[in-house]
């Protein structure tokens, strides 16, 4: 479920609260009005927490991507500049839903790692897998 769907759910629940309370009172279920109100409020709070958590996680990933980008600019020929706290720039870009940029990052890493004399077998396999995935999705990867 994406952010727009969660926000739509939150809005729907917020507007349905008065309707549910009114419906319960018309049905003569005054005792359950508190239960319905409490459950609806709990769902609203839970939706808020989920949305906030997802937003914070996404912001943290974007901040790490930017930090690695600055690292790359400072040391463009260092293979370690593609990593921060054990995470590769390409993996973070994939997590952020940016597969084309991830492919470019993996390709650049492969070139820098080859120049540094490192084994690039795993990276080459990851690139091939990502290119195949992009090709299947209709986005022809041309790098």
Image (cartoon, helix red, strand yellow):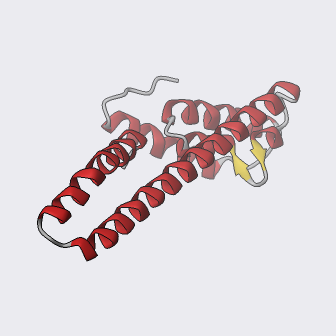
As drawn, the residue found furthest toward the bottom would be 31
Q: Quadrant of residue 96?
A: top right
Residue 68 in the image, given as x and y percentages of width and height: 76, 36
Residue at 71 percent across and 37 percent down: it is 63
Residue at 34 percent across and 43 percent down: it is 11
Q: Is residue 103 left or right of residue 135?
A: right
Residue 135 in the image, given as x and y percentages of width and height: 35, 34
Q: Is residue 17 left or right of residue 97?
A: left
Total tally of numbered discs in the picture:
0
Residue at 87 percent across and 30 percent down: it is 75
Q: Quadrant of residue 44?
A: bottom left
Residue 46 in the image, given as x and y percentages of width and height: 46, 60
Residue at 27 percent across and 76 percent down: it is 31
Q: Nearer the viewer, residue 123 or 88?
A: 88
Q: Is residue 13 above or below residue 74?
A: below
Q: Nearer the viewer, residue 130 or 43?
A: 43
Q: Is residue 73 left or right of residue 102?
A: right
Q: Is residue 51 above or below residue 110?
A: below
Q: Is residue 65 left or right of residue 76?
A: left
Residue 24 in the image, given as x and y percentages of width and height: 19, 65
Q: Is residue 121 above or below residue 75?
A: below
Q: Nearer the viewer, residue 14 or 3?
A: 14
As drawn, the residue found furthest toward the right would be 74
Q: Nearer the viewer, residue 18 or 99?
A: 18
């Amino acid at each position: 479920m994406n952010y727009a769907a969660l926000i739509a759910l939150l809005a729907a629940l917020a507007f349905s609260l008065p309707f549910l309370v009114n419906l319960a009172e018309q049905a003569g279920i005054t005792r359950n009005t508190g239960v319905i109100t409490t459950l609806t409020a709990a769902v609203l709070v839970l939706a808020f927490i989920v949305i906030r958590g997802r937003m914070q996680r996404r912001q943290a990933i974007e901040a790490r991507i930017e930090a690695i980008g600055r690292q790359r600019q400072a040391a463009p020929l260092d293979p370690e500049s593609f990593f921060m706290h054990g995470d590769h720039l390409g993996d973070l870009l994939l997590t952020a839903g940016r597969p084309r940029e991830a492919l470019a990052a993996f390709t650049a890493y492969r070139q820098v790692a080859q120049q540094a004399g490192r084994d690039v077998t795993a990276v080459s396999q990851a690139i091939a897998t990502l290119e195949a995935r992009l090709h299947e999705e209709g986005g022809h990867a041309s790098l």
